[in-house]
Image: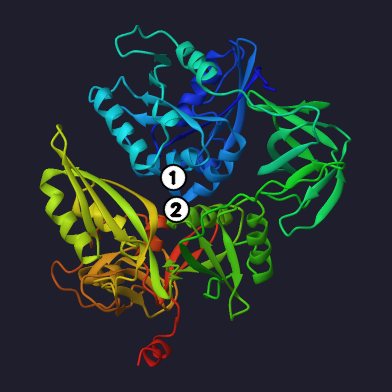
Amino acid sequence: MLQNHIRNIAIIAHVDHGKTTLVDEMLKQSGTFRSNQQVDERVMDSNDLERERGITILSKNTSITYNDVKVNIVDTPGHADFGGEVERIMKMVDGVLLLVDAKEGPMPQTKFVLKKALEEGLKPVVVINKIDRPEARCSEVIDMVLDLFIDLGADDRQLDFPVIYASAKEGYAKNNEEDENVDMIPLFDMILKEVPAPEGILEDGLQLRISSIDYDKYVGRIGIGKVTRGSIQRNQEVTLCLTDGTFKKFRINKLFTFSGLGKVEVEEAEFGEIVSICGYDNINIGETVCSMDKIEALPFIEIDKPTLSMNFIVNNSPFAGKEGKFVTSRQIKDRLEKELLSNVALQVEDTHFADSFKVSGRGELHLSILIETMRREGYEFSVSRPEVIMRTIDGARHEPMEEVTIEVPEEYVGVVIETLGTRKGEMTNMIPNSNGTTRLEFNVPARGLIGYRSQFMTDTRGNGILNHVFAGYIPYTGELSSRSRGSIVAFEPGTAVTYGLFNAQGRGTLFATPGLEIYEGMIVGENARAGDILVNVCKRKQLTNVRASGSDDSMKLVPVSDMSLEQALEFIAEDELVEVTPESIRLRKKILDKNLRAKAGR
């Protein structure tokens, strides 16, 4: 039996190819909003961090109605670090819209998300987006997409994919390039025609797999998933098949479906519908809700394992507790365990030390988003340098490898190839573009990319584009050269003053400004040479009656650029930490006392 009045789709693409903008336009043109309603741009990016960075971090559900057919839409993250969101969403939909930039073509994350869709047997509808760009090259991009499908082992049904041309920003879609630019109706028609309706048996017992988790302070934990069999009613007694093989009975207190940007409470939902349920506070992703008379668990959602880890440590600097609200190990552990409930790609382990927790994720961005979220909630802690997670395969040591795609002007090609060569990178492709840039493709050990982004921006004078995606494990490639420059470390506590900073700035690049509170062991700059150097940036000029001509002229300091959290994590060495508080991001040595540090280094 088919539910012809329902379609379930996910929108997948590389980061910044226009997924959320397309959803905005679909919502507007389907009549979801009132004509006089004020709607924010990128309305699906509801999280502050998502709006600031212009990326989607959490997958979100919405729905539109077109020609009496309800289309449930899931907006997914484009960045591979949030791939855990994409993997579980594929179980909830019957088709995908694959967005590809009309200029850039398929990028690493396009390959990542498409691979997940093809593995689930979904048939994609390819949307060539941003066709209004002057550099758009639609026919070339379609050929590149076809090559990508073939590389990923798509079957004949998937290779016969429909194509639609769109500009989400301008609000139109069309079946052929030469058609008139009108509205999004051709895209809506294509979805109804190409995305299969959900199939199932209504009279059979209920089966619903939890694919996402939400939380509401009034009703508690909310499980989100697609009803794959039967129907579900409010107040129904059901059995929950837990991931450990046990069962738990509970009652469905509330039942919601999605409508526009909100939820609508309903009494009943049939198979094919995406619903939210409340009633059991410990419900988890991957668990199956079944009717009492027919208990059959669906296979657990397999999520790729983390590739990067770092330690979250209770802050023990002299400034500990001054700026944060939550500073103890118990509070940090409780917050990390709460994150595990919805962040399926994350892992948290205890270490040998009571004040330290090993947190593993899919990449630097995945972990830095968690750190940034926690500091905004009032948490204060320190984090160590990211480390890749090694695996033993067939008795040999293997490490994660990243597939790197770089687009740079021709004059910077040499320095990029040379630098990645020293980081054990292996170039696999080099494609000159018509606009004077060159596209380079590399396989690089994940270790080699830690700390590379800031160097890349310097090498290319900010003109390069760098993207990378996890591409599997390779045999361990040997030791990598560490950071070539040392740190400028303060050895006296106090307040930084212009006189002390002026004397120190000749040694390298400073991070500190006049008036900044300093403690011993705090990193105040990057040394121009290898090895650390100790300075006193709190040193004041001795005021005597003796004056020399010109010596009292105003001292000029080189402007300091604020270091972001990602830059700080990339900068630190193995013996250093990033101190994170709601108000500050500081760099420091693990051992603050210079004498103890010297003794430990022997």
For the question of whether residue 321 can be seen, the reply is no
For the question of whether residue 139 can be seen, the reply is yes
Q: Is residue 85 left or right of residue 172?
A: right
Give the residue type at disc 2: Leu
Q: Which residue lies at the image location 83% right of the left edge and 46% below the top edge?
A: 239
Nearest the viewer among 367 and 424 is: 424
Q: Is residue 508 left or right of residue 201?
A: left
Measuring from the top left, give residue 583's x and y in whole percent. 52, 57
Rendered view: 454 above or below 296: below
Q: For the N terminus, which image quadrant? A: top right
Count residues near mark 2 (Cα–Cα under 10 Å), then give few for <14, some for 14-19, many for 20+: some
Count residues near mark 1 (Cα–Cα under 10 Å), then give few for <14, some for 14-19, many for 20+: many
Nearest the viewer among 257 and 2 is: 2
Numbered tag placed on residue 365 in the rendering: 2
Give the residue type at disc 1: His
Rendered view: 27 above or below 564: above
Residue that numbered label 1 is attached to? 79
Q: Which residue lies at the image location 46% right of the left edge and 25% below the top edge?
A: 22
Measuring from the top left, give residue 143's x and y in whole percent. 27, 29
Rendered view: 505 above or below 14: below
Q: CA distance from mark 1 to mark 2?
A: 9 Å
Q: Nearer the viewer, mark 1 or mark 2?
A: 1
Q: Is residue 586 left or right of residue 550?
A: right
Whichever of callouts 1 and 2 sits on the residue coming sooner in the sequence is 1
